[in-house]
Image (tube, rainbow, N blue to C red):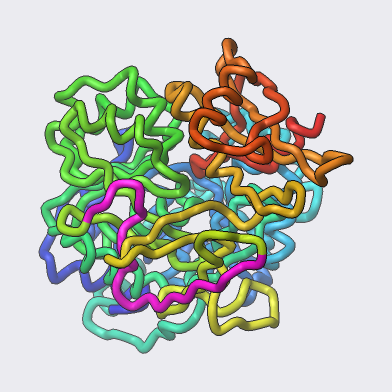
């Protein structure tokens, strides 16, 4: 079944499965319960939504079981879920709402209070957006609603109406690391295709249990961390944040989770708190969103864990390539998953690799609200593919500096401070330079970082003066987005200040 709601209904063929979704608050739901509750909530939502017509419905909730119920209630209604990154600030949120023509957002008073988001809510409300609180829905939930939901449940099970698999299911938003967030409208077909591609590559079976702490507004958090396990018949444990570094390794063990997705930034933060027993049940540890450093691989290997590095973009629903246990090459992001075509365009001034373009059933052909369509999606990533078909990410096109006419990869330069100071965060930015156009500056949280030590090391490695940072700026905390990526946009401002 391609349509998300039909796919949810089809999980009945697996029989009754208890605790398909559970969370850290003790909320649980079975597959049958998820179908019924999505119908019940959907019917009540229709009473609350006034003059909303075909507008998307905003979803602003953390990783909790009710968030999944709301999401599938929106799919039951045949509407589009616009999933809002509540960590991105009022300006970005309002920009996303405007782009998507959202009027109503579903959230929870308890979540707002616990996250101290009252001022954020007031600012959004001042722009004429309306919030629907789960607590208020419970107040208007009557016995007759439950009776009608049972009737609708039985009708939906036995009578299958035709649903459009090519209509939008969800709107996610790009991270805004380099520019304003763009709306990415993913169809039911996009999401279905990617689930099938990932399952074929990783050969996950239905006995697995996913630990999902990447948020719903993160494409991996939603597409691979929630939709894949729930609709395939696996179980999932939801945790509201990846930032509880001491708690998460212990919870992975306690919940007997076997599949875990994360980013290099977060994986490094977990290392001081890991005991070998924490990962005794883990079969798949998959990392994406940013390059996994060799030191991270080494430290997890000591705990008997092989990190399977992958690559994805929101526009691809999201997976593009992944290392598997059968096809693995460290330093790469694996081979392209089935069904993705790619081409690499050479770029003037770049001596290695080229710009990656992709297309496939899982990949969008235009951004939400924009008329311009594209046959091939330009990832903005500079890559190379080796003779065995493994994909290597060389850097973002925007993360290159032009110094004395030569294109220099900032990601490549970062490899050297990472070798010297592997336990620290190290990011290279480019700033304006009157003589050579641009100059390199290293931002690091290593309080003992010494520019001469770094430049001497790089010279010994055979690099010319063009590749050497001219300045080091020590910062105490690296800005991280809710998705787990480093916020390069904010770092660029710091480097220029």
Q: Is residue 60 above or below residue 273?
A: below
Q: Is residue 92 above or below residue 32?
A: above
Viewport quadrant of the C terminus:
top right
Q: Is 330 contained in the magenta span? A: yes
Q: Is residue 71 above or below residue 92?
A: below
Residue furthest top as drawn: 448
Q: Main secondary structure of the magenta part?
A: loop
Q: Nearer the viewer, residue 35 or 252?
A: 252
Residue furthest bottom as drawn: 162
Left or right: residue 308 compared with residue 207? right
Q: Nearer the viewer, residue 200 or 27?
A: 200
Q: Which residues are magenta?
A: 328-348
- Which picture quadrant has residue 198? bottom left
- Which picture quadrant has residue 472? top right
Q: Position of residue 352 (x, y in %)?
A: 52, 60
Q: Is residue 43 visible?
A: no
Residue furthest right as drawn: 434
Left or right: residue 448 compared with residue 160? right
């Amino acid at each position: 079944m391609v349509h998300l709601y039909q796919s949810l209904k089809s999980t009945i063929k697996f029989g009754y499965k208890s605790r398909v979704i559970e969370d850290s608050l003790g909320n649980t739901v079975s597959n049958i319960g998820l179908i019924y509750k999505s119908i019940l909530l959907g019917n009540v939502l229709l009473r609350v939504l006034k003059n909303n017509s075909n507008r998307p419905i905003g979803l602003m909730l953390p990783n909790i079981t009710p968030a999944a119920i709301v999401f599938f209630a929106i799919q039951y209604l045949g509407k589009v879920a616009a999933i809002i990154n509540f960590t991105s600030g009022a300006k970005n949120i309002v920009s996303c709402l405007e782009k998507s023509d959202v009027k109503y957002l579903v959230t929870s008073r308890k979540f707002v209070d616990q996250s101290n988001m009252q001022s954020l809510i007031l600012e959004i409300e001042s722009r004429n957006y309306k919030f629907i609180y789960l607590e208020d829905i419970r107040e208007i939930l009557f016995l007759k609603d439950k009776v009608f939901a049972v009737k609708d449940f039985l009708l939906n099970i036995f009578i299958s109406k035709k649903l459009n698999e090519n209509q939008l299911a969800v709107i996610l938003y790009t991270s805004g690391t380099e520019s304003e967030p763009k709306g990415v409208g993913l169809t039911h077909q996009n999401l279905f295709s990617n689930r099938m591609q990932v399952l074929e590559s990783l050969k996950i079976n239905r006995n697995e249990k996913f630990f999902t702490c990447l948020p719903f507004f993160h494409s991996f958090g939603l597409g691979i961390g929630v939709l894949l396990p729930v609709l395939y018949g696996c179980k999932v444990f939801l945790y509201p944040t990846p930032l509880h570094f001491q708690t998460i390794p212990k919870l992975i063990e306690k919940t007997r989770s076997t599949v875990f997705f994360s980013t290099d930034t977060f994986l490094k933060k977990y290392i001081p708190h890991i005991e070998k027993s924490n990962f005794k049940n883990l079969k798949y540890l998959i990392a994406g969103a940013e390059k996994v450093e060799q030191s991270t691989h080494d430290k997890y290997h000591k705990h008997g864990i092989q990190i399977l590095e992958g690559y994805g973009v929101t526009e691809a629903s999201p997976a593009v390539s992944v290392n598997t246990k059968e096809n693995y090459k460290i330093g790469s992001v694996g081979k392209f998953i089935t069904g993705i075509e790619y081409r690499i365009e050479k770029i003037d001034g770049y001596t290695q690799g080229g710009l990656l373009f992709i297309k496939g059933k899982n990949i969008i052909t235009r951004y939400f609200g924009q008329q311009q369509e594209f046959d091939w999606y330009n990832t903005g990533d500079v890559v190379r593919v080796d003779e065995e078909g493994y994909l290597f990410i060389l850097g973002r096109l925007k993360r290159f500096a032009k110094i004395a006419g030569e294109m220099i990869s900032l990601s490549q330069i970062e490899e050297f401070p990472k070798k010297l100071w592997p336990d620290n965060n190290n990011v290279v930015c480019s700033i304006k330079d009157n003589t050579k156009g641009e100059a390199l500056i290293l931002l690091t949280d290593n309080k003992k970082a010494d520019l001469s030590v770094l430049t001497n090391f790089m010279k010994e490695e055979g690099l010319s003066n063009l590749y050497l940072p001219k300045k080091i700026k020590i910062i105490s905390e690296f800005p991280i987005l809710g998705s787990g990526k480093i916020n390069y946009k904010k770092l660029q401002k710091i480097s220029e200040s």
